Image (cartoon, grey):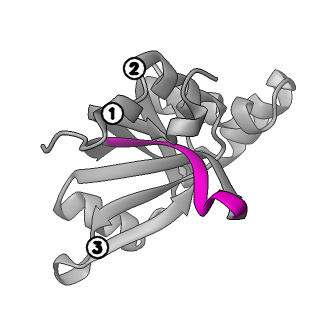
Amino acid sequence: MREMRRFKQALTPDECAAVLDRGTSGVLAVIGDGGCPYAVPLSYVRLDGKLYFHFAMAGHKLDAIRADSRASFCVIDQDRVVPEEYTTYFRSVIVFGTARVVDDPVEKRRSIDALCAKYRPGFPAERAAEIDGSWDRFLMVELAPERVTGKQAKELMGR
């Protein structure tokens, strides 16, 4: 993989992890039909250094990762246009890796619970009941990072 051109603006691994932990959505990019890039916004959760997504039981995303597991996921942490400076104060992270359907029931349960807890903290009994009642409709996909890069505007460095 190529190196970041503006490496002085690179985020540290801890800063990348923080961006991923506080983010609520990002864009998953896969190799779609006919080799055409396919990118779609998704909610996600980071668990044990991996990203997890809830997919429908059928569809373009699922077909794409089953055909070619390579994927990337981009989270934008900040995007503030500063017109008077003709620039944008930005911070983002891209995860490059391999995606797979989660088949193990223990891993599936853990990832679903973490995803649900991220978007509706508390209520563990209600969360467990929802997961139990929808178990057969849950399809979880893991993105195992092979490389994580983050970058920010030079104006944000040191903040």
Disc 3: CA contacts within 10 A as few (<14), some (14-19) or many (>=20): few
Q: Amino acid at mark 1?
A: Val
Q: Amino acid at mark 3?
A: Pro
Asked if marks 3 and 1 touch (Cβ < 8 Å), the reply is no
As helix, strand or loop, the secondary structure at mark 3 comes to strand
Q: Nearer the viewer, residue 3 or 146?
A: 3
Q: Which residue is mark 3?
A: 37
Q: CA distance from mark 1 to mark 2?
A: 8 Å
Residue appearing at x 41%, y 36% in the figure: 150
Q: Main secondary structure of the magenta part?
A: strand
Q: Write down the region rendered in magenta.
A: 84-95
Q: Which residue is mark 2?
A: 13
Percent coordinates x, y for residue 121 in the rendering = 81, 28
In the rendered image, which quarter contains the N terminus?
Answer: top left
Q: On screen, 132 above or below 68?
A: above
Q: Which residue is mark 1?
A: 148
Task: Judge from the rendering whether residue 146 lies leftward or rightward of residue 141; answer left or right.
Answer: left
Mark 1 / mark 2, whichever is N-terminal: 2
Q: Quadrant of residue 91?
A: top right
Q: Quadrant of residue 49?
A: top left
| Residue 41 marker | none
In front: label 3 or label 1: 1
Q: Residue furthest front?
A: 84
In front: label 2 or label 3: 2
Q: Nearer the viewer, residue 22 or 117?
A: 22
Q: Amino acid at mark 2?
A: Pro
Asked if marks 1 and 2 touch (Cβ < 8 Å), the reply is yes
